[in-house]
Image (cartoon, helix red, strand yellow):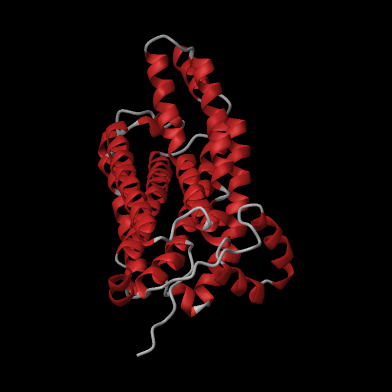
Amino acid sequence: MEKNTTNDTINYYPDIRVYASGVCFIIMAFFNVIINWTIMREERLRGHARFVLIFHLLFSALVYFAVCSAFYLQIYLQLETSAAACRTVITILISSASNILLTLTAMALDRYYAVCFPLKYSSTCSWQWPWLTGLLTWGLALIIPLSLFFKLDDIDYARCDREHLRKGEIHKILLITTCLAVIIFSYIRTFQESRRLGVLNRRNSVACKTIALHGTQLAVYLLPNFVNFLLHSLERNKYLERRDKELYGVVIFAFCSLAQCIAPIVYGLRNDELLEDMHRRFPQLWCNLKSLVEWTVRTTQVRVQSQAREKAIASETLISIPPPATPV
């Protein structure tokens, strides 16, 4: 009886989690169809690191919300699952969530390398390496669930609930801390180099807004982890009731999950080249997508007059415009 009460408390508000993850899955599925299909069909897009990493990011988010919806749905319906099925679901959930963070780290490093070393970036980066980077991030993302694979034998698999996701706290903290440190370093160095080149200034509102939006989107991905850790600490020290902790946790989950759906706009649809290609392939959606993007970027673009090739490439990279091909 005590075990059932504990499980009911742990799995509190599963219906809200089902609705939130289900809505996010539908939104991500839509953006995966129109954005990733365009990237795969356009040779110049699938050969550019920025768009390939966007492809990996959106696909990882799609997998995460799809499995997340199924996970909370079986909790809500109180279905019994086999140990193998539960292990598989937990592995996909943890690895896809980790891969989102690793892909964001790869995107930050890509921008850092492109802005701080533009000439070397243009000459050394081939079309294969971003695809290989995607495979590498998936491999790294599997480390945490696979390292916990043989440590979950003491857990009851009769009900595959959120208790299975609470394992590996140290591994997750190390991953988040490492990725956050790399991302912050990359953004600081990118900001400093842009200021040095004169690319980032008050007149260049597009570049400033890009950095602000990327920082906000990154906070949306990381906020639930820190909030859940804080709530767990408050509950463990008897400062917070379990019921209140679950209420705050589900609110943060729903808010941040829905906020993550802005990622396709922040990282993808604000790029003019991608929008033009999507206009050719999905002309019926053009007006709606254009209206959706206008609230994140002004319709008037500020022209930054470059005086050196290095400065021009860094400027175009920072405002997310692929550098022009250099004639031989």
Residue under the image location 32 percent in, 66 percent down: 132
Pinpoint residue 187: horizontal percent, then vertical percent: 37, 50
Vertical side of 288 occupied by 295: above or below: above
Number of on-image labels: 0
Q: Is residue 244 above or below residue 276?
A: above
**Residue 163 or residue 327, whichever sits in front:** 327
x then y, percent, for residue 6? 46, 17
Q: Measuring 54% from the left and 23% from the top, which residue is drawn there? A: 248
User: Which residue shows up at 31% across the image and 32% down it?
Assistant: 169
Does residue 170 sit above or below 128 in this rendering? above
Left or right position of 147 against 195 = left
Query: x, y percentage for residue 77?
Result: 59, 33
**Residue sitting at 50 percent across and 43 percent down?**
216
Whether residue 136 is situated above or below residue 245 in the rendered picture: below
Residue 190 appears in view: yes
In x, y percent, where is residue 18? 59, 37
Residue 72 located left or right of residue 134? right
Residue 160 visible, this angle = no
Residue positioned most to the bottom: 328
In the rendered image, the quadrant that contains the C terminus is bottom left
- Report which quarter residue 297 is drawn in: bottom right
In terms of image quadrants, where is residue 237? top left
* 70, 181: nearer the viewer: 181
